[in-house]
Image (spheres, rainbow, N blue to C red):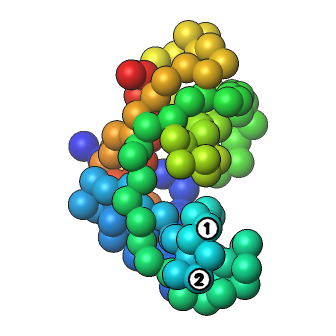
Amino acid sequence: MAEKRPPRTLGPGHDQFWEWCSKSELRLQKCASCGGINWPVRQTCEFCGHAEFAWEAMSGRGKVVSWCSFHQDYYGGVMPRPYDCILVELDEGVLFLSNPQGFAIEDITLGMDVAVQFMACEDGGGSFKLPVFARV
């Protein structure tokens, strides 16, 4: 059963990201000019300002560099509280904010190895797969 989530950002660039996630692939924008990997989704490269991108497959592996628990209801009861977030530094160097999958926040250690998984979710825009991270 799909887990209810707050509304995703949709539109140019974002739709392509979610399309790759629907195929259980973590792909991010790679600048056609300088090769910089851009995240979150952008219309122009954060490194050189170029506006052409390719969707580069990421390894999906990384390390936890920060974490927290949210106790305030920011989403009108859509998500049960508290909910946990982790900041993962992907092997490619990109920082990716996500949720832990299959482990408690109390079990996290700095630099813990994690890998992406895709969780079935739904919001007002429909069903989608959300990238979350599990312990390696």
Q: In which quarter of the image is residue 119?
A: top left
Q: Residues within 10 Å of mark 1 (few under 14, many from 20)?
A: some
| Residue 125 place in picture, x, y as percent | 41, 71
Going by the image, does 26 lie left or right of 77? Answer: left
Q: Amino acid type of disc 1?
A: Gly
- Identified at 28% across, 61% down, the residue is 22
Residue wearing tag 1: 36
| Residue 122 place in picture, x, y as percent | 37, 57
The one nearer the camera, 90 or 71, is 90
SS for dot 1? loop
| Residue 3 place in picture, x, y as percent | 37, 45
Return the residue found at the far top: 107
How far apart are labels 2 and 1 at the CA level?
8 Å
- Identified at 44% across, 37% down, the residue is 61
**On screen, residue 87 above or below 105:** below
Quadrant holding the N terminus: top left
